[in-house]
Amino acid sequence: MLEMINHAILNLRTRRASSAIAAIIPHDYPNSFLDTLRSPQAGHYWVGCDVSHDMLTVASERETSTAGDLFHHDMGTGLPFQPASFDGCISISALQWLCYSNTAAQVPKRRLVRFFSALYGVLKRGARAVLQFYPETPEQAVLISGEGDRRLERSDSSFTYHSLLN
């Protein structure tokens, strides 16, 4: 049952990822994308990370004709890439998970600061990011977009948020 749910979630995220990439990059432009969930797109190299081993297993079983890599990582600890590594970033239904603590050491605001600071660093100059999330409360929406906006003020990058309140 869990595997069936994971496949359904991955299919939905893949469709949304296609729309996100189409919205920010021309199709004839070669790109490298950071994706917080594997959503392979034709003609683009991608790197997908997820904190869920189950989602990575489902993603690795999917057939894809594009070049990319997957790895297990908690984006609330930052992003382990060289500066200016990516032309863009898409995040479909992942940011809201940074608002939760699994240990006493995990503070949601700090996790968001680490993610957005690292994201700014790994994006190339003028890069764009589409970040779609499902906050549980209006306060989570304000926290997520507020931290992103604070980091964005120091960059020439562009973030697009799509928040869907439950």
Image (spheres, rainbow, N blue to C red):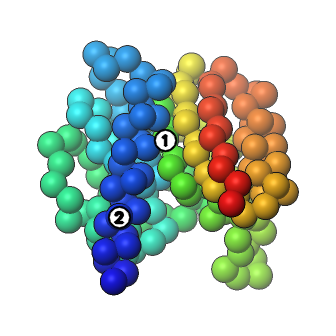
Q: Which residue is drawn at 75% across and 43% down?
A: 145
Q: Earlier in the sequence, mark 2 or mark 1?
A: 2
Q: Distance between the residues labelled 2 and 1?
A: 19 Å
Crowding at mark 2 (Cα within 10 Å: few <14, some 14-19, many 20+): few
Q: Determine whether, in the image, residue 76 is placed left or right of residue 93.
A: right
Crowding at mark 1 (Cα within 10 Å: few <14, some 14-19, many 20+): many
Q: Residue at x 18, y 48 (%)?
A: 64
Q: Kindly indicate the quadrant of the structure image that contains residue 67.
A: top left
Vertical order, 53 against 128 (above or below): below
The image position of residue 160, as x and y in percent, is: 62, 32
At numbered mark 1, what does the secondary structure look like: helix, strand or loop? strand
Q: Determine whether, in the image, residue 3 is placed left or right of residue 148.
A: left
Q: Kindly indicate the quadrant of the structure image that contains residue 137.
A: bottom right
Q: Mark 2 points at which residue?
A: 8
Q: Which residue is drawn at 37% across and 81% down?
A: 2
Q: Determine whether, in the image, residue 49 is placed left or right of residue 114.
A: left
Can residue 87 be seen at all in this image of the molecule?
no
Which amino acid is tagged 1? Ile
The image position of residue 76, as x and y in percent, is: 63, 61
Q: Determine whether, in the image, residue 83 is placed left or right of residue 9.
A: right
Which amino acid is tagged 2? Ala
Question: Residue extending furthest front?
Answer: 166
The image position of residue 77, as x and y in percent, is: 62, 61
Q: Name the residue under label 1.
A: 90
The image position of residue 58, as x and y in percent, is: 29, 68
Vertical order, 80 against 129 (above or below): below
Q: Residue at x 84, y 57 (%)?
A: 139
* Quadrant in the picture for the C terminus: bottom right
